[in-house]
Amino acid sequence: MAKVELIMPKMGESVAEATIISWHKEVGESIEMDETIVEIATDKVDSEVPSSLEGTLVEKLFDVDAVVKVGEPFAIIETDAEESNSPAATAAQEEVIPQAEEVAQQVEEVIEQVTESISKIENTGERFYSPLVRSIATEEGITVEELDTINGSGKDGRVTKNDLLQHLENRTSGKTDTPSPKVAVSTPPPSPAPKVSTPPKVSISGNSEIVEMDRMRKLIADHMVMSKQTSPHVTSFVEADVTTVVNWRNKIKGEFKQREGQNITFTPIFIEAVAKAIKDFPMINVSVDGTNIVVHKNVNIGMAAALPSGNLIVPVVKGADQMNLMGITKTVNDLANRARNNQLKPDEIQGGTFTLTNVGSFGNVMGTPIINQPQVAILAVGAIKKKPAVIETPHGDLIGIRHMMFLSLSYDHRVVDGALGGSFLRKVADYLEQFDANTSI
């Protein structure tokens, strides 16, 4: 019999760790090849990890809510193969445990210690803390409220062991976690940070129903609040005449469906217009890093998509400026279909530099979207409506029925002023209004 470590697999270029959200197998249960053993979460994407070997689960190295790094063992299984000669295990795993009894005992002791130490601190869903951080916090008498005030340097602002130790050192010496800004002699000190307001208490009666947020809704809520606290939002609006776009799509959608086996929507056309406008105004395709502006050379456009559960996810069309309309259309359809079926890979919702959201799909004529951090702008496209409009002709102005829509751009006023935001928005509308009716796809 051989005891083998199951390794957390690589889930994408930018994904370094995952959170265990549920175990599908218990210790002592048998596991078939490719059978799901654990379910994990990375950002908003939940994935199942299959076993690469047949055997029996003998030990879980992590509990639910624990964070596991890519390449790190998360479970031990026992196989029927000989420990010294197991080609299947060698091919599927990085190494066979040479001293399984000793390692298992050590892991069991660590888990027991951590379990005991974190009994007073639990994850509330508002912010995730690793078992090690919770253990240190409990030992040092740090409350969850105090943990929430610590600036995290880990992924997605997560508090690491070093962050917590630095906080303890600063607390002992009377310092704060936030480093003091360098102030010139002639410059007055910055105003004190405003106090964080406490949400009002909700009155609950017998006619009220309490529904707990699911994990994704908690993530979305935290991200939206963080964005509003981070960026001073400004929203500009324009109205665009998209009659040519509507007529063109109506003309080719039947043929396209028959030839390609998929629909062509307005979204690829909007993304193409945004990608062109970003080339004209590259300072809209940036992020803020302290006092530095990071200008992104890649044009990666996220498209907000509503899931059947009612939650929101933003798959990213990467390199949109390098694609033609056919390429954007197929990418959009593929991402949208897999988003609805919860089949997106972690990398496919990361790396966006600008976001598009279609509020018109719900019949809304306009919206004021919240910026998807760390981006600095997000475009909302409203419903297309037939309206009477003035048409300029060489023979004079006429009144005609046109297909009109509102575009609204929310942008981060720290780095995007009205001139840039308004000019970029107008340029997107210009590209839509100047759409070539003879475009082939």
Image (cartoon, helix red, strand yellow):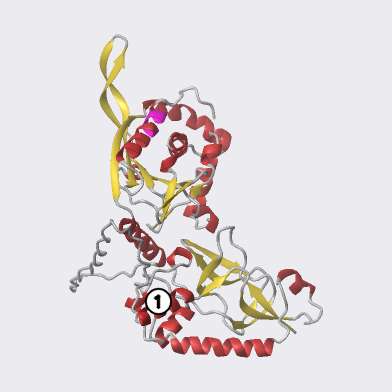
Q: In the figure, 227 relative to 434: above or below?
A: below
Task: Residue type at mark 1: give it.
Answer: His
Q: Where is residue 241 in the image (x, y as percent from the top left)?
A: 33, 28
Q: In the figure, 117 relative to 206: above or below?
A: below
Residue sitting at x 35%, y 67%? 213
Residue sitting at x 58%, y 81%? 60
Q: In the figure, 275 relative to 85: above or below?
A: above
Nearer to me, 179 or 199: 179
Magenta span: helix, strand or loop, mainly?
A: helix
- On-image quarter of the C terminus: top right
Which range is magenta?
Answer: 428-432
Q: Where is residue 335 in the image (x, y as percent from the top left)?
A: 51, 49
Nearer to me, 264 or 355: 355
Q: Name the residue under label 1.
A: 167
Give left or right: position of 373 versus 6: left
Crowd rating for badge 1 (residues with CA inside 10 Å; few <14, some 14–19, many 20+):
many
